[in-house]
Image: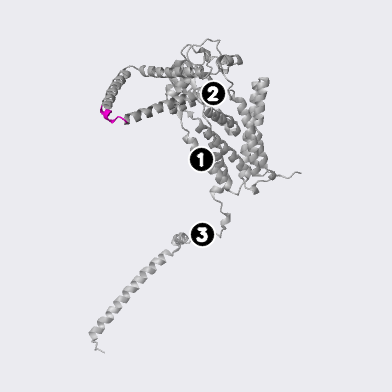
Amino acid sequence: MPNITASEKFNYTQTINRNTVGLNLEYLKQTKTIICILKPTNFKAVTLILLAFIPKCYAPPIEQDDVKFTSKLPVVSILRTVLLGYMTHIVTIRPRTGVSGFSTIFRRLLALLYPSSGIGTAIESMYKSFNGDKILGISQYTFLLKSYDDENSDKATEKKDGDSHYPNNKASSDSLLLIKASASECEKDEEENTESTDAQELHLEISRLRDRLVQDAKNKNIDIKEYDNAPYLAAFLHVIGPEQAKKTKGCILNRSVTIGFNNVKPTIYMLSSRVTNEISVTGPGAACKNQAEILPKVFRYMSDSMIDQLETAHNMDETSYVEILVTIGQLFFTTIECMDIDGDRWAKVIIIIYTSMSVLQTGSLIALHKQTMAFSIKNDGRENMFLNSKVLTLTEEERKLLGESTNKFESNEEVVILSTFTGIVVFLLIGIWADYSSHSITEWLVLAWILSPILAALGFFTFICNNSDIMLYLILVIASISSIGCLIAATIIGYLPKENIIISPVL
């Protein structure tokens, strides 16, 4: 072991003591800090720090079954059902453009109270879409126009084959095409200087096709009456092209075409007329003071000049993208609600009814497009007969004179009433899924709501028999209040928890 001198031993001992004193001072600082924190004045801060690190330590234990999520609350379920199940249905109702006794708002409120009331409108629109040519009176010329198209396509094919057999004449044919193209360009420049040139050329083309149709129709023993201008209407729709013709026919069949007029004899009774400023309308007749409604079957008796004014009516066509998206969302919501085993099935029957009606209304909008606004054609002064209600409704004598066959859906009041009763039967069949043996309060309320349109129908029958406006309004008010009351009560009771529904015992 090495010998340690006294001086080295003294230095070592001094170093150890110095380190020990430093550690002791550090421990004293930490101890002082802890003592300061644990003073009574800072005890509250310590408590808050501990509570932040130890959540729920200050409350008794809870069971997860007692926690109710906001989405499961009855109030939230009721509001979600009303907004997504009921109110979205009114978006799919076909808007009414032009001159009409019932506005779009009235029709949507009626569909909200009585969903079955919209069946007639939807079925009528689908019928018009598939039988539009029959309603317009031009169906007898369809096969002739198709034969003309086939003939023209055959000629075009023969001409193309003939050109391929003579390649040496390509240069001369190209030069001829250039000459024709330059000539056509000059013609276009001249047409731009005259606004009426295009309309005149269109009229001449339609007139030539009309004359050919009349001649071929006589050869086919198709009878054409004196006042019947259906051949010109058929030729007009054929010349403007299939896409524009479909949109124009949709505008006519929706009764979105009106006649503009300024002065009419007081003796002429209007079927339905409005001041132009009261409706949204465009077209050649929009500058007139008044607008009159006209039925689709009367267009075949108009003059050439009035039919020519329909050239831009196709611009009123509008596709129902919003209605389609709303219906898809409503279907998705209804499917989720019906898959949920909780809840009263009779309350879900209401959602099924509204969704089925939305699907029907959207289907009718796809079949027969809606219009952005009414399109007005100007009365040329010789068609005052078309503003007469007797001509618009057509008596039996006028049918024989004009060769008019009885059109279905001429008066849609009968269709609406018949479809309403059909809808009631279908809705009652849906109740089989909800179980008729339950005999719950919701069941009786839903059944009363489904059958409430019968009371409204009785009001219409009373009006027809007695011609009493007061009785009609009284019955409609009672029926509407009863319907909305049953609907709201069935929705609230159907979505309330069963334990919250207390029925007082009968003493």
Residue 260 rendering spot, x and y as whole percentages: 47, 17
Screen quadrant of the C terminus? top right
User: Can residue 472 be seen from the camera position used here?
Assistant: yes
Q: Farthest residue toward the right?
A: 507
Residue on which the image places disc 3: 56
Find the distance from the CA under tag 2 to the CA under tag 1.
32 Å
Q: Earlier in the sequence, mark 2 or mark 3?
A: 3
Q: Nearer the viewer, mark 2 or mark 1?
A: 2
422 in relation to 21, above or below: above
Find the distance from the CA under tag 2 to the CA under tag 3.
76 Å
Residue on which the image places disc 2: 135
As drawn, is 303 to the left or to the right of 267?
left
Screen quadrant of the N terminus? bottom left
Front position in the image: 426 or 303 = 303
Q: Farthest residue toward the front?
A: 165
Neighbor class of circle 1 (other Cα within 10 Å; few <14, some 14-19, many 20+) is some
Residue segment shown in magenta: 165-171
Residue on which the image places disc 1: 328
When asked about the image quadrant of residue 486, the answer is top right
> Mark 2 is on which residue type?
Ile
Find the distance from the CA under tag 3 to the CA under tag 1.
45 Å
User: Can residue 313 be seen from the camera position used here?
Assistant: no
When asked about the image quadrant of residue 347, the answer is top right
> Mark 1 is on which residue type?
Ile
> Mark 3 is on which residue type?
Lys
Front position in the image: 403 or 97 = 403
Q: Earlier in the sequence, mark 3 or mark 1?
A: 3
Q: Secondary structure at mark 1?
A: helix
**Residue in the picture at 56% in, 39% down:** 355
Magenta region includes residue 263 = no
Residue 279 rendering spot, x and y as whole percentages: 48, 22
